[in-house]
Image (tube, rainbow, N blue to C red):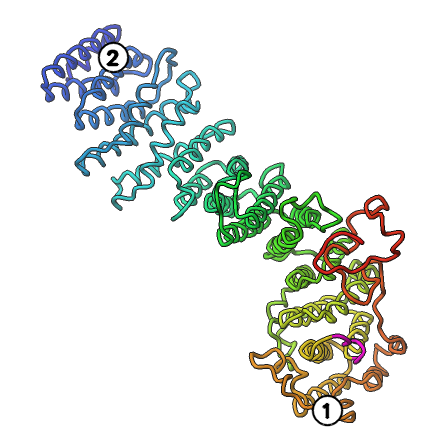
């Protein structure tokens, strides 16, 4: 071998004849089944390849590749392994001179076949599969950076390479480094890391096809593991291309079973978390548009019981609810990867998609009707809450709650649906709560100590003062009306306490605190409870007591806190059913409460005279005259009537209703209430 190498280096023009001789000799020994000489011929060729200068290697390569083909076509596993090892050594040789006529199509096909080996001996099967994977890795390394070589990124090659790798990635047969799964992951990552912008689509499409064909979107999520590898391996600036591929695939499977759609959405959610560049590409709103469209379709499927137009394929309510939860979670995952300004745009976008029956009939499906629109409303509001699950770091409330978002959001507090009202209260609280105190205020007791809160020490900024002047009265009005809803439950009253507390903490302003006290005094007036059940009346009183005690610790004189504390102590002795610890407990005591005498009732209420006396002589004195005018909510077109309107009778702030859209509006003069229906009458 030393003499042969010296001769080859001395006379490089003889290399092609030497290579032809070795190829002829290997063919002869292979036909005679003399495998020892076959190994010698391959070893000789390998050493010549490694020893020869780069300029001369082309004289050897054609013969060398033909020798490998012969070994790979033989039905002998040890020859497969021998050929693969030789090819890997060749793939690691750097060449300086281009080759115009070299083809690797056969090797892509053969190595891919080896990856699917089903040899009866498990040990040999693993060996063959590992060899196939290493061979594909060699092909990629040899061709990916050479434009004159075969284009490995063509669909015809990717459709062989990618499924071959994924089949082995599924099978975690062993945990050692020689197992197909381990080798596959290394090869798959290397392939993806070398993919340029124009190659991502060709690399991802076979993955989606493989997961479809083998029904791998369902069950233990191999699909999630697969796309985690993809997202971590590709260049970060290409991440949005993977997201777009998944969104397109989700649309293509819109009439697939709910489990398949949920699997794709779960992958989308995980991919969004990994997506590192902080953006999902230039079409951010298209991402959310696709997800919202899936929500709407899922509602239609849930109500009809079928996920196709022909009504042949059944679905269940539980399956569709699981899908809807996955979509909402994914909306939050996507939103949390975005910068603040884009998340604000997303919230406005979602708000514009919330349907109002009779006003936005085109937004709901004709099959879903009133119930479908209600379900979509609930899910889109949940999506808004999910978008803000990681609080936005707004510096002022004017930016956090622009008119284009706040007005339509507040209009939903007039809905009869309790779940919708509760979601609106939660969304408002999450956006106003810039100092993240809401979590500490959940299930707050009546004697809550505000020292545990992250209080603002500075006064309101100019933008916050503008927000107060522009929107505060509207906020108070909706709080007042929400308190008077007979369908409100424990969660609503606790949410109201949290919202009022967050408002008073974030808007540290004498005018705001006085207005909130006026609001509470108006709520405890007996006339404000007309038509409410005993529980609702007790709930309103519990809200007033808890909030006033908390408010009295935020700056007003100590005399106010003394009065509030005295009233609470009187209630603890004589009327515990007017405090949250009793009315919101598992066994509320309001049902067994005895009627109180007029004198007793007087000492259980927060008195205007005592409050004015407490505030006299303080910085709040200039606002005391405001107490001479009892708080009354400003009536608008949204609530001309004393009772709440149904979902379809709310005048939307998002569009301008004309006579042609509601022909009876002029003759009726008002929006009449119609429970359970949509449209105007």
Pointer 2 with pointer 1, Cβ within 8 A:
no
Q: Name the quadrant of the C terminus.
A: bottom right
Where disc 1 sits, the SS reads loop
Outermost residue on the front side: it is 311
Residue 486 x, y percent position in the rendering: 70, 71
Seen from the viewer's position, the closer of residues 261 and 563 is 261
Does residue 112 lie above or below 490 as drawn? above
Q: Which residue is mark 2?
A: 63
Does residue 501 lie above or below 571 as drawn? above
Q: Is residue 170 left or right of residue 408?
A: left
Q: Residue at x 37, y 17 (%)?
A: 96
- What number is the disc on residue 128? none
Residue 111 x, y percent position in the rendering: 29, 26
Residue 119 visible in the displayed image: yes
Residue 15 x, y percent position in the rendering: 24, 9
> To which quarter of the image does residue 51 belong?
top left
Seen from the viewer's position, the closer of residues 423 and 370 is 370
Q: Is residue 382 left or right of residue 211?
A: right
Categorize mark 1 by other alpha carbons within 10 Å: few (<14), some (14-19), many (20+): few
> To which quarter of the image does residue 66 belong?
top left
Q: Is residue 438 left or right of residue 85?
A: right
Where disc 2 sits, the SS reads helix
Q: Is residue 5 within the magenta segment?
A: no
Q: Is residue 269 left or right of residue 623?
A: left
Q: Which residue is mark 1?
A: 596
Q: Is residue 526 within the magenta segment?
A: yes
**Magenta part of the protein: which range?**
525-531
Residue 583 x, y percent position in the rendering: 63, 80
Q: Residue at x 34, y 22 (%)?
A: 94
Categorize mark 2 by other alpha carbons within 10 Å: few (<14), some (14-19), many (20+): many
Q: Disc 2 vs disc 1: which is toward the camera?
A: 1
Residue 546 visible in the displayed image: no
């Amino acid at each position: 071998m030393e003499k042969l190498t010296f001769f080859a280096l001395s006379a490089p023009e003889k290399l092609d004849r030497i290579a032809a001789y070795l190829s002829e000799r290997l063919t002869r020994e292979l036909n005679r089944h003399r495998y020892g000489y076959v190994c010698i011929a391959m070893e000789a060729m390998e050493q010549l390849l490694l020893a020869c200068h780069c300029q001369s290697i082309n004289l050897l390569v054609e013969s060398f590749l033909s020798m490998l083909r012969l070994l790979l076509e033989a039905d002998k596993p040890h020859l497969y392994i021998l050929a693969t090892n030789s090819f890997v050594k060749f793939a690691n040789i750097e060449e300086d001179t281009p080759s115009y006529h070299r083809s690797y199509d056969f090797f892509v096909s053969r190595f891919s076949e080896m990856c699917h080996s089903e040899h009866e001996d498990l040990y040999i099967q693993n060996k063959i599969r590992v060899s196939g994977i290493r061979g594909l890795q060699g092909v990629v390394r040899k061709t990916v950076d050479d434009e004159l070589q075969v284009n490995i990124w063509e669909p015809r090659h990717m459709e062989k390479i990618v499924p071959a790798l994924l089949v082995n990635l599924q099978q975690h047969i062993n945990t050692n480094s020689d197992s197909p799964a381990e080798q596959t992951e290394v090869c798959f990552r290397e392939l993806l890391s070398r993919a340029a912008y124009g190659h991502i689509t060709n690399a991802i499409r076979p993955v989606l096809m493989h997961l479809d064909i083998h029904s791998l979107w369902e069950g233990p999520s191999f699909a999630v593991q697969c796309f985690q590898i993809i997202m971590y391996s590709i260049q970060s600036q290409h991440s949005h291309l993977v997201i777009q591929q998944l969104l397109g695939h989700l649309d293509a499977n819109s009439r697939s079973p709910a489990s398949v759609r949920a699997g794709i959405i779960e992958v989308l959610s995980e991919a969004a978390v990994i997506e590192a560049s902080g953006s999902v590409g230039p079409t951010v709103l298209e991402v959310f548009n696709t997800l919202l469209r899936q929500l709407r379709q899922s509602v239609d499927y849930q109500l009809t019981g079928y996920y196709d137009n022909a009504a042949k394929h059944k679905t269940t309510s539980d399956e569709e609810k699981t899908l809807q939860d996955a979509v909402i979670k994914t909306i939050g995952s996507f939103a949390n990867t975005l910068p603040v300004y884009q998340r604000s745009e997303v919230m406005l976008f979602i708000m514009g998609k919330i349907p109002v029956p009779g006003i936005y009939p085109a937004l709901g499906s004709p099959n879903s009707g009133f119930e479908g629109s209600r379900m979509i409303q609930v899910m889109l509001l949940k999506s808004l809450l999910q978008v803000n699950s990681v609080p936005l770091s707004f510096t002022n409330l004017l930016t956090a709650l622009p008119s284009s978002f706040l007005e339509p959001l507040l209009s939903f507090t007039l809905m009869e649906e309790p779940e919708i009202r509760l979601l609106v209260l939660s969304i408002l609280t999450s956006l106003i709560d810039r100092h993240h105190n809401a979590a500490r205020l959940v299930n707050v007791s009546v004697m809550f100590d505000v020292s545990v809160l992250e209080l603002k020490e500075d006064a309101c900024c100019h933008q916050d003062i503008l927000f107060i002047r522009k929107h505060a009265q509207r906020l108070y009005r909706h709080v007042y009306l929400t308190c008077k809803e007979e369908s409100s439950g424990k969660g609503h009253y606790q949410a109201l306490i949290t919202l009022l507390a967050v408002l008073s903490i974030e808007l540290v302003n004498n005018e705001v605190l006085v207005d909130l006290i006026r609001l509470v005094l108006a709520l405890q007036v007996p006339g404000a409870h007309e038509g409410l059940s005993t529980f609702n009346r007790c709930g309103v009183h519990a809200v007033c007591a808890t909030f006033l005690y908390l408010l009295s610790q935020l700056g007003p004189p100590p005399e106010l806190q003394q009065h509030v504390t005295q009233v609470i102590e009187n209630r603890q002795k004589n009327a515990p059913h007017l405090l949250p610890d009793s009315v919101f407990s598992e066994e509320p005591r309001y049902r067994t409460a005895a009627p109180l005498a007029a004198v007793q009732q007087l000492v259980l209420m927060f008195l205007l005279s005592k409050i004015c006396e407490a505030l006299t002589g303080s910085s709040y004195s200039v606002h005391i005259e405001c107490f001479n005018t009892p708080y009354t909510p400003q009536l608008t077109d949204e609530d001309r009537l004393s009772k709440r309107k149904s979902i379809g009778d709310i005048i939307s702030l998002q569009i301008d209703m004309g006579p042609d859209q509601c022909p009876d509006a002029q003759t009726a003069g008002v929006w009449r209430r119609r429970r359970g229906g949509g449209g105007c009458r």
